Image (spheres, rainbow, N blue to C red):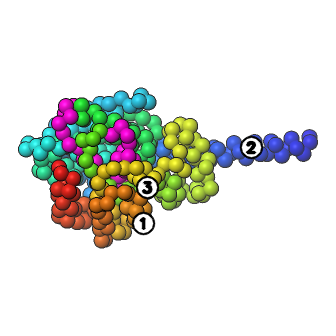
Amino acid sequence: MPIFTILFGVLILAGAFFLLIGYRVFSGFAVRGKQGKNAHLRQEGAGEYTEWFFSQHPEEHHLKTADGVLLCGRLLRAEKPRGATVLLLHGYLGNGPDHMGMFVPFYLNEGFDVFVPDHRAHGDSEGKYIGFGETDADDCAAWCRYLDRMYDGKRKLLLHGVSMGGATACGASAKAELPECVLGVVSDCAFSSCLEQFSYSLRFIVSLSPKILLPAANFWCKRLARYDIFRASAAEHIKESPLPFLFIHGADDKFVPTEMVYQLFDACPDEGKILWVVPDAKHFVSYTVAKEEYEARLRTFFERIGI
């Protein structure tokens, strides 16, 4: 057998093996239900209010996306409305009520209607592939248009996202299709880009997978999930955002490194942007660690944006 044929066969086998391993990495991050023991991440303090949330009998709403995914969201209405609705955007491998339920009583007491969607491939929303804030940003903008129509254009909207939900809010804020009634963004412990977060999190999600496999994982991500790991960047998207921002991040965050919030803050063009790094807070616990100050900073932000 000619040496060229042997070498060609070896290259074909090596390439196939590389793509198969790449699929393992991709599926460990982005295919619904492939995360094993981490299939439902509930951070410290999250989920405490889930039972209470459902006891309030929220309205259930559904929206079909442009690519045919049926999304689910739930709405609670304030007893004394102030003419504003907040969209609470949950994090990776969670769902709306579990991750964001702890914020709901505060917002209701402040007179906000509260809309809590499940991201695609999470909770009660359909979808096989997790959007990592990319496809979710389009979905978020679609929910904003849905709510704007539902309220007949008479309601102000606020985006408040945590972790992947924060990256979603950052991306959505730059969408041309976002209605003008969206007045501001609260981004809590968001990651600055898919590439950096994927690289950093390999040791948490896909054991023993070297970073060199990310190009192979991206091969599948582009073809199946319809976004590019190497281009998906909240820090890049936010450069085009016209909205005011409040950035929050835990000083001891080891899941989404604290340095990422500085990348987002530096990229944001909002001249009045605010950054609060919460001492002694790990990932997704800033509200739990410093609840009173967190709420005070939210109220100050409401005043700034005129809600």
Secondary element at tag 1:
helix
- Residue 250: percent from the left, percent from the top? 33, 65
On screen, residue 125 versus residue 199, left or right, reads: left
Q: Position of residue 253 (x, y in %)?
A: 38, 65
| Marks 2/3: CA–CA distance | 38 Å
At 40% across and 52% down in the image, what residue appears? Answer: 238
Q: Nearer the viewer, mark 1 or mark 3?
A: 3
Q: Earlier in the sequence, mark 1 or mark 2?
A: 2
Would residue 45 be counted in the magenta stretch? no
Is residue 298 shown left or right of residue 173? left
Residue 198's label in the rendered image is none
Q: Nearer the viewer, mark 1 or mark 2?
A: 1
237 and 161: which is toward the camera: 237
Above or below for 166 versus 154: below
User: Circle 2 is placed at which residue position?
Assistant: 13
Q: Looking at the image, which residue is at 43% across and 62% down?
A: 263
Q: Amino acid at mark 2?
A: Leu
